[in-house]
Image (spheres, rainbow, N blue to C red):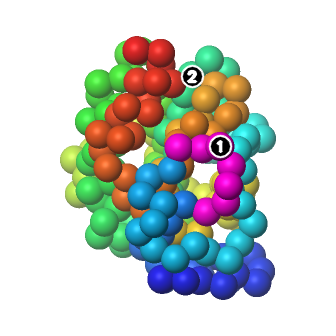
Amino acid sequence: MRVNIVGRGLLVASLVLVSCGTAVGSAPVQNEAPDRHEPVAIAAAPSRVSALTMRTTDGKDVAIPTAGRPTIVYFMAAWCVSCVQGAVNLARIHEDYSARGLQVIAIDVDPGETPADLDRFRSLAGDPRYFWAMDVGGRATSAYRVVYLDTTILVSGSGEVLFRSNSLPDPNTLRRAVQQALEL
């Protein structure tokens, strides 16, 4: 599905309406299934990200990137059906690699949702033990140029985007990207 985005307000609206997408841009990033959908008419996704701190639903501040730690950033909404499977897949990867330094944060991008909505979603996904945050003001969505729910981004500890999928990624492909980031 093609989405033309004119301004920030339409960006949020498109996130609410679209639940999967495709990789955009020509940055040297490993992209998942770039030919699954039409490209989106927005600026190319960044190959590096600036430091961003997210407040989690349990009151902690999580820095992205975190020096020396790769981080998976997952963009979702509590009402999104496919996002439940994405959260479950990430829970398995987090369980396997968190002791080796992997950090995971799921970010709810719907401005109409509450922490209680996110808690209900988290329960549906089996209560994964990674970080959960609300994208208050759309800061993360804007910084990562996210247009689709299920967007999954792996960022190195120095801020380099190592993997990006603008749709629900294949868990094995993401797992291999994590192993490379952790030099396993």
Kindly identify the residue that appears in the image at 71 percent across and 61 percent down: 44
Residue numbers of the magenta segment: 24-30
**Of the residues shown, which amino acid type is indicated by label 1?**
Pro
Query: Label 2 belongs to which residue?
Result: 69
Report the amino acid beneath label 2: Arg
Callout 1 crowding tier (Cα within 10 Å): few <14, some 14–19, many ≥20: few
Name the residue carrying label 1.
Answer: 28
**In the picture shown, does residue 79 fall above or below 45?**
below
> Mark 2, residues whose alpha carbon is within 10 Å: few (<14), some, or many (≥20)?
many
Q: Which mark is residue 146?
A: none
Compared to residue 109, the image places residue 122 above or below, namely above
Q: Residue at x 67, y 34 (%)?
A: 160
What residue sits 54% from the left and 60% below the top?
23
Residue 121 visible from this viewpoint: no
**Would residue 103 be visible to someone looking at this image?**
yes
Q: Judge from the rendering whether residue 58 lies leftward or rightward of residue 123; answer left or right.
A: right
Q: Taking 58 as reference, is 6 left or right?
A: right
Residue 24 spot, x, y in % from top left: 61, 63
The quarter in which the C terminus is drawn is top left
Residue nearest the observer in this picture, 50 or 173: 173
Cβ atoms at labels 1 and 2 below 8 Å apart = no
Q: Nearer the viewer, mark 1 or mark 2?
A: 1
| Residue shown at the point (30%, 44%) measured from the top left | 171
- Label 1 SS: loop
Q: Is residue 55 above or below residue 69?
A: below
Q: Main SS type for the magenta part?
A: loop
Please provide percent x and percent y for residue 72. Answer: 49, 39
Looking at the rendered structure, the secondary structure element under dot 2 is loop
Q: x, y percentage for residue 130?
A: 40, 36
